[in-house]
Image (cartoon, grey):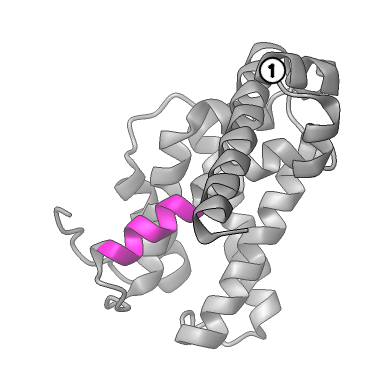
Amino acid sequence: MTDEQKNRHQLRRQRTRKQLQDAMLELVLEKGIDSIVIQEITDRADVGRGTFYFHFKDKEDVLWSIIEDRIQATEKILMENFDGKMPEKPEYYGYVNIFQHVDQNKQIYQMLVSSKGSQEVTNRTKQYMMAETIRDIKTYNVYHEIEQPPDITAQIVVGLLFSLVFWWIETPNEYSAADMGAIMYRTLHHREPPILPSI
């Protein structure tokens, strides 16, 4: 197989994966995850059942992949905004980034915390965030003033973060993503956050 053929094959796989994700997102927002069967996803994506299982193991896996892809996209934008360098008080920018991600994907997160949601996908999102927090602690020495083992710090940070996120999207309020990041930063770090630049 030539490089050109490999590239075409890869693009086809990416397109098919995206078709399945788009179909799943439409369905889950319409009716909730429990009511969806695999056949509905494949029918809407216009692919075969075997193709579904080539890309995903079940419907929760599709929903998680949508969230994971969007989290990684916002993380990439954050790193690009700072030219790949760690800014001063990086925890604050991480918090704001997460709240911005949630704001941009509010329908998905509102569905997750509703009766139409999936506890499995919520738990996978938490586990992902805890793993990322532990990695950042070990790699970038963030949260160094919180003198706890990394896994304990991750539990504290992610637990508070999820509580605030769910409150923020379920309760009418006028707080922006930057406001919520500042609240999180003051609560955990006991100091004022930096002034958020216009980036």
Span shown in magenta: 72-80
Report the quarter where the C terminus lies: bottom left
In the image, residue 103 sits, relative to residue 93, either above or below, namely above
Residue at 41% from the left image edge and 52% from the top image edge: 74
Would residue 16 be counted in the magenta stretch?
no
Query: 74 or 118: nearer the eye?
Result: 74
In the image, residue 181 sits, relative to residue 166, either above or below, namely below
Query: 93 or 132: nearer the eye?
Result: 132
Percent from the top left, x then y, of residue 53?
83, 38
Residue at 55% from the left image edge and 37% from the top image edge: 167
Report the quarter where the N terminus lies: bottom right
Q: Amino acid at mark 1?
A: Asp
Query: 64 or 174: nearer the eye?
Result: 64
188 left or right, relative to 81: right
Percent from the top left, x then y, of residue 88?
27, 78
Give the residue number, with chain letter if any, for mark 1.
46
In the image, residue 41 sits, relative to residue 163, either above or below, namely above
Main SS of the magenta segment?
Answer: helix
How many labels were placed on the picture?
Answer: 1
Determine if residue 37 is in view.
no
Residue at 57% from the left image edge and 87% from the top image edge: 147
Residue at 61% from the left image edge and 18% from the top image edge: 26
Q: Tell me if mark 1 has few (under 14), some (14-19) or many (20+) residues whose alpha carbon lies within 10 angstroms of its own.
A: few
